[in-house]
Image: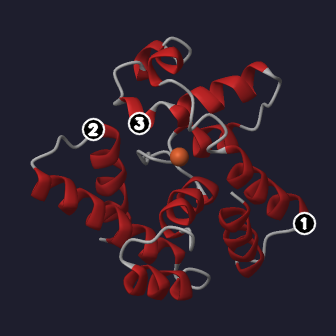
Amino acid sequence: MTRVADLMGAWAASAGLGTGDVLRWRAAAHLHDVLRDADPETLRQRVPPALQALPGLMLHGPAAAERLRVAGVDDGELLSAVAYHTVGSPYFGGLGRALYAADFLDPGRSFLPEWRQALRARAPSELDDVVFEIVGSRIRHRVEQGGRILSLTLDFWNRMVEERS
Ligand SMILES: [Fe+2]
């Protein structure tokens, strides 16, 4: 999580955000996977009803956001970023998009190292383009596997396409 937080901090600073927002971006990175190793079926009972049908591996985001909300965190953009970091959301602001990308580009993960390194290099100046590329790649990958595409993910993609047209 520290590696993801370092990426987020650097991107927030590159975007010209102030100290408070840099801290929010870093905090989201530190918190997003806090329940990653918890039992998915236990988490399923703790997320809002609309999200209970998510695949097990994707429940730790909404469950972490719900735990933070109950603990008194009222930063809606941060909660949304944490909740949807594996799925994507058409309602993401800059923080949500950055966390979605930073999680995928974590230097400690070993898949597709050269491509992800190139995306990390571009991210500080072209974050939306990098996010667009990641979403498209992940959807293509799921299609090639014959897997289901969640409607939130498709809506995220379509939102970005609309912004670019
Ligand atoms: Fe995660």
Compare marks 2 and 3 and give the one earlier in the sequence.
3
The amino acid at mark 2 is Ser
* Mark 3 residue element: helix
Q: Above or below — where is 71 with respect to 87?
A: above
Label 1 residue near ligand 1, CB within 8 Å: no
Q: Name the residue beneath numbered marker 1.
A: 19
The amino acid at mark 3 is Leu
Q: Name the residue beneath numbered marker 3.
A: 57
Task: Please report the residue visible at 51 percent of the width from the left and 24 percent of the height from the top.
Answer: 39
Dot in front, 3 or 1 = 3
Q: Above or below — where is 102 with respect to 143?
A: below
How many badges with numbers are in the image?
3
Q: Name the residue beneath numbered marker 2.
A: 151
Q: Position of residue 155 (x, y in %)?
A: 31, 46
Task: Please report the residue visible at 58 percent of the width from the left and 63 percent of the height from the top.
Answer: 98
Task: Find out whether the residues at labels 2 and 3 contact each other: C-beta distance under 8 Å.
Answer: no
Q: Position of residue 32 (x, y in %)?
A: 64, 45
What distance separates the C-alpha of mark 2 from that of mark 3?
Answer: 16 Å
* Mark 2 residue element: helix
Q: Which mark is residue 66?
A: none
Label 3 residue near ligand 1, CB within 8 Å: no
Single out the residue that lies furthest toward the right: 19
Q: Position of residue 84 (x, y in %)?
A: 50, 41
